[in-house]
Structure formats: C-alpha cells, structure tokens
Image: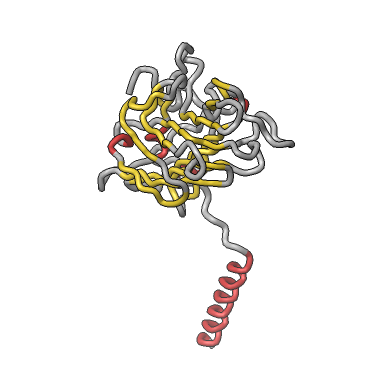
Amino acid sequence: MKSIKTALGVLGTALLMSVAPVSHAGEWTLNFNNANVYTGDAPPLQAGATSTTTWAQLMFTDYNTNYVDIKLSVPTGVLLPGIYVNDWWFNGDALAQTGTFSLLSGVNANTSICSDCQNGTGSGSYDGVFHFVNANPGELAQGHESTWRLTVAAGQTLSVGDFQFLSCLPGKDCGTTGLYAAVHVQGYFSSAKSGGCVSGEEGCTPPPPCEEGDTRPECGGGEQEIPEPATLAIIGSGLLGMALARRRRVR
C-alpha cells in the first residue's frame, strides 16, 4: 500500500454501517451521487432527483469467514436513461489482495486486485477494479446489479475492514481529502467520476472497530431478543399447565 492510503479511523468517507449477526458479521455501503463528483461533468438526473440522490451503490458484506461478498448496483429513476457505469475502483489490504473473484449473479466484468495496481485516472491509485463493457449489452446499466465473492485461503478471516482504506486525490492534501472507492459513469454528453462521498463531510466517520467484549449490536452484542407476544402466551400456557399438573399430584 502506498503512503497515500490511510487506514479507517484516521479519515472517513460517507458510509452506512449496519449488521445483523444472525445472517452476517458486517456490512459496509458506499453511496455515489452528484455531490461527490470530483472530475468531469456531473451526469444529468431525472426530475425529482437532487445532487445527493444515490445513483450508484457499492456494498461489502462479510460473514466472519474467508470470503466477502461485493455488490455493485445502479438504481433506476435517478440518472437519465442511457447512462451507465463502466469502471469501479476500490481498495483492499494485503489479505484482500490475495483473494480470487467469482461472479455470484448479475452483470459480468473483468476484475483485478493487487497493491496499487489500478490507476483511477485522476482519482489516485487503487487495489482493485471492476471493468464493465463500455457498450450495450455488457455495461452496468440502470436497474442492474453485479454481485461477486472475493475468497481468501481457508483459515483466514476476511471482513469489511479489509477494504476500508483511502486513496488520495492527486494534488490534494491527503489529510483532508480521500476516497474509499471511485466510479466512472458514461452514456451522456460527457463522463464523470464520483468518490462515494469525500472524507471530512459531516457524519462520515464510521464507528470504531469491534473489540473483545464489545456489547454493540454490530459487534454481536446488545440486548437479548425479546420474545413476541404470541410466543410469551405459549410459554405462559405451558408453565400454567405444568403448575396444575403438579398441584394434582400433590393432592
């Protein structure tokens, strides 16, 4: 990793962090919109959409095992018809760089991951990239998704934290500006790159990493699940029946 990469916690970009311990250990979502376009002309939007309306999304999901699922999606109803994604850059640490990709569903792409091997063309260096076809069919068009699994060696544990590193924008102060990922959109009079929110914006710093004994729900802790009323009624009826049976035996 080059020095322009900064680990999570030092700098942050806009993201949503949520987990459901039953189904997966961690989930990290990056949203891309016109407010974060840093080069080129912002893509035209449909009526009702604003500069902060998400038109592309990158989601990492881990399962506390040796693989992470990566879903790239472009929703409908935001960009004007015909606009699509053809390149998507992201970062990963030394463990993630040893992984191999397999397509789970959706649009296919050429993939690559290694240390600083991908130049985002004006957005810095990245460790991985998804190259979609630059024409129809094959591009990541609106309403389409592309879901991949990145797998490392058995016995290793890959998590969303293995992808939370920043690339510095060329000519910018890495202490104030950085990107976790970048996306290239085309299909209109120009093209643009968005960083999924630039670091330093309000609410962009993610929560601290999980530690042993952490009681936060996203770390597998939290309060015990409260049974539903119907379940409580069944349990109560069973206990009452046991009490009556015991009473009859005592007599």
Residue 54 lies left or right of residue 90; in this view the side is right
Q: Quadrant of residue 91?
A: top left
Where in the figure is residue 139, as x and y percent of width and height?
Answer: 49, 41
Please give the name of the residue rendered at 54% of the width and 20% of the height, measured from the top-left corner.
Answer: 39
In the picture as drawn, the residue positioned furthest to the right comes out as 48
Q: Is residue 31 above or below residue 153?
A: above
The answer to whether residue 215 of the structure is visible from this angle is no
Foreground of the two, 113 or 136:
136
Q: Residue at x 44, y 22 (%)?
A: 121
Indicate the position of residue 153 as horizontal and vertical percent values: 25, 44
**Residue depicted at x 60% and y 63%:** 228
Residue displayed at 51% across by 30% down: 184
Who is closer to the viewer here, 248 or 55? 55
Give left or right: position of 13 versus 64.
right
Residue 81 visible in this rendered orientation of the protein:
yes
Q: Nearer the viewer, residue 181 or 19?
A: 181
Residue 216: give x, y in percent of width and height: 49, 42
In this view, 209 is above or below 238: above
Q: Quadrant of residue 125?
A: top left
In the picture provided, is 111 more to the left or to the right than 242? left
Question: Where in the figure is residue 236, as x and y percent of width and height?
Answer: 59, 72
**In front of the other: 110 or 224:** 110
Identify the image quadrant of the N terminus: top left
Q: Where the C terminus falls, by quadrant?
A: bottom right
Q: Is residue 35 above or below residue 76?
A: above
